[in-house]
Image (spheres, rainbow, N blue to C red):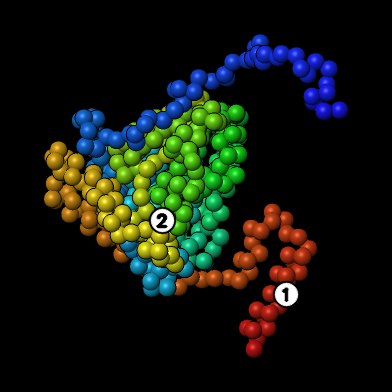
Amino acid sequence: MTVQELPGAGASHRSTQPPAWSPRTDAAPLLPDPEPYRVLGTEAADRLDPELMRRYYAELVRGRRYNAQATALTKQGRLAVYPSTVGQEACEIAAALVLEDQDWLFPSYRDTLAAVARGLDPVQALTLLRGDWHTGYDPREHRIAPLSTPLATQLPHAVGLAHAARLRGDDVVALAMVGDGGTSEGDFHEALNFAAVWQAPVVFLVQNNGFAISVPLAKQTAAPTLAHKAVGYGMPGRLVDGNDIAAMHEVLTEAVRRARSGGGPTLIEAVTYRMEAHTNADDATRYRGDAEVEAWKAHDPVDLLERELTARGIIDEAAIQAVREDAEAMAAALREGMNADPVVDPMDLFAHVYAEQTDRLREQAAMLRAELEAEDQA
């Protein structure tokens, strides 16, 4: 029997809404602004905190020098790979500095600078990219989740930790960082959905740097902005100029405050640009032109803040020089640390694979141990 043959199929029918139906949430307050939020170069800059901005300036200069030194280390063979954050330093540093000591940072593989800004030793931050050790630091000590290369897998981890902390009554906020390419992963959807339903104290920071390796944003999503995706999960979305560190500070601070006070998660899209290639193994000239890069250099996060603070008399040439000298000292210490040959124990291959080793893993460990002992005796 077809639908047309059903009794009453020819009768007129007028659909009605279910009697108790209504939107669960008013979408309007969740929508991002039509343009990225900015402070530097606007009237909002009149309220800048000079001491805070001087600290941010120092961190930006150190961050730029850190990126340059890490890139040089790849060319010297001291690093296997390095994903640079030149042009994204404002996102990285603001994400680290808005957190309290008890909070957790969940970085992606590109976010070593955020970990360094949070206080991690630069050598430890680069250990994973050197290939020497699983992570290079104790995540619990630093409240920084392990740096790892799978895209977006850190986001559900951030939600789980934040939700568990709230259930325990701990005052903890998790800030999870991801790139624009990571928003196409299933982990992104799962994390945002769980976070919104549980009202977990999480802040999601998307660094939209224009490309997922060679894939431009237009081939990632048809959404008006990545911040608009927040509405579908029932959380607010914020769109911010990712190269304006004062704007980044304000937006992230408000999102962290909201999460800490029980207001739930926020999705922030920071519009920035990856000035350099995806990694030292990438040729960015194959998918973007020099003119595009040059246009973004005019919106460099270090220069933006330096111009604003100089014009307002918050820093002078002596202060700028002092900051640069401090950055050089950091780079020298990083070079020295990375030039030291690591002490590698092959048996570490079997550490931290399982909480309790399997029989098969014990067999493999015993086999390797025997081979190493035989080499020593030869």
Which mark, residue 8?
none
Label 1 element class: helix
Question: Alpha carbon of mark 2 to alpha carbon of mark 1: how far?
Answer: 35 Å
Q: Quadrant of residue 90?
A: top left
Q: Residue at x 19, y 53 (%)?
A: 322
* Residue that numbered label 2 is attached to: 121
Which residue is denoted by mark 1 in the rendering? Answer: 367
Q: Residue furthest top?
A: 19
Q: Residue at x 49, y 41 (%)?
A: 222
Q: Position of residue 163 (x, y in %)?
A: 59, 33
Q: x, y percentage for residue 96?
A: 40, 43
Q: Quadrant of the C terminus?
A: bottom right
Query: Is 80 located above or below residue 21 in the figure?
Result: below
Q: Which one is in front, 170 or 93?
A: 93
Looking at marks 2 and 1 on the same chain, the residue that comes earlier in the sequence is marked by 2
Q: What's the residue at 51%, 53% (across, down)? A: 147
Amino acid on which the number 2 mark rests in the picture? Asp
The number of discs equals: 2
Q: Residue at x 33, y 52 (%)?
A: 87
How would you rate the neighbour count of disc 1 (Cα within 10 Å): few for under 14, some for 14-19, many for 20 or more? few
Q: Is residue 257 left or right of residue 350?
A: left
Which quarter of the image is occupied by the N terminus? top right
Does residue 232 appear in the picture of this structure?
Answer: yes
Q: Is residue 161 visible?
A: no
Query: Could you tell me residue 103's position as x and y percent?
Result: 48, 38
